[in-house]
Image (cartoon, rainbow, N blue to C red):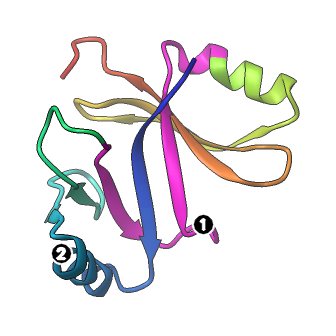
């Protein structure tokens, strides 16, 4: 069974949305030092229930995207297409994180798949 490990909230004004979640939910939000603008969201201490996520500029119409961890992205992309879904972006190597792709289910709902980096970092 595959489980969500990350969420993304898409926004037109990311700074405004980040401030909202900081104020309302006390989330810790910081700009990622990666190749594109992306804000990391820490929703609570490690070892407690829940997942962390990210904020990014809106580039899909869906406002929230969940990402599921998989052992083999290539195998899972094949399964997605065989079941009537499709890959819409990627795979993309995220430095020190893993290999990621966005997909759609047969009704157009977007979700992410991530194969963690082999070194576990």
User: How many numbered marks does the figure carry?
Assistant: 2
The crowding category of the residue bearing disc 2, from other C-alpha atoms within 10 Å (few below 14, some 14 to 19, many at least 20), is some
Apparent side of residue 10 relative to residue 76 in the rendered image (left or right):
left
Q: Is residue 77 magenta?
A: no
Question: Dividing the image into 4 quarters, which one contains the C terminus?
Answer: top left
Q: Is residue 53 magenta?
A: yes
Question: Dividing the image into 4 quarters, which one contains the N terminus?
Answer: top right
Element at badge 2? helix
Residue at 52 percent across and 62 percent down: it is 64
Residue at 31 percent across and 43 percent down: it is 50
Is residue 117 positioned above or below 31 on the image?
Answer: above
- Whole-percent x, y for residue 97 in the image: 28, 31
Residue at 30 percent across and 59 percent down: it is 36
- Whole-percent x, y for residue 52 in the image: 28, 48
The crowding category of the residue bearing disc 1, from other C-alpha atoms within 10 Å (few below 14, some 14 to 19, many at least 20), is few
Q: Nearer the viewer, residue 104 or 35?
A: 104
Q: Dividing the picture into quarters, in which one does residue 9 lie?
A: bottom left
Is residue 99 positioned above or below 45 on the image?
Answer: above
Kindly check if marks 1 and 2 are in contact, taking CB atoms under 8 A apart as contact: no
- Whole-percent x, y for residue 26 in the image: 15, 70
Q: CA distance from mark 1 to mark 2?
A: 23 Å
Is residue 118 positioned above or below 56 on the image?
Answer: above
Residue 22: which disc? 2
Q: Which residues are magenta?
A: 50-75
Q: Which residue is mark 1?
A: 60
């Amino acid at each position: 069974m595959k489980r969500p490990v990350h969420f993304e909230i898409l926004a037109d004004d990311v700074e405004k949305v980040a401030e909202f979640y900081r104020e309302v939910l006390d989330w810790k939000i910081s700009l990622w030092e990666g190749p594109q603008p992306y804000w990391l969201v820490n929703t609570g201490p490690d070892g407690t229930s829940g997942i962390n996520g990210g904020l990014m500029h809106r580039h899909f119409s869906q406002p929230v995207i969940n990402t599921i961890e998989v052992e083999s992205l290539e195998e899972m992309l094949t399964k997605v297409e065989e079941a009537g879904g499709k890959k819409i972006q990627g795979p993309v190597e995220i430095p020190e994180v893993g290999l990621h792709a966005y997909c759609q289910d047969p009704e157009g709902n977007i979700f992410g798949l991530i194969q963690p980096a082999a070194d576990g970092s």
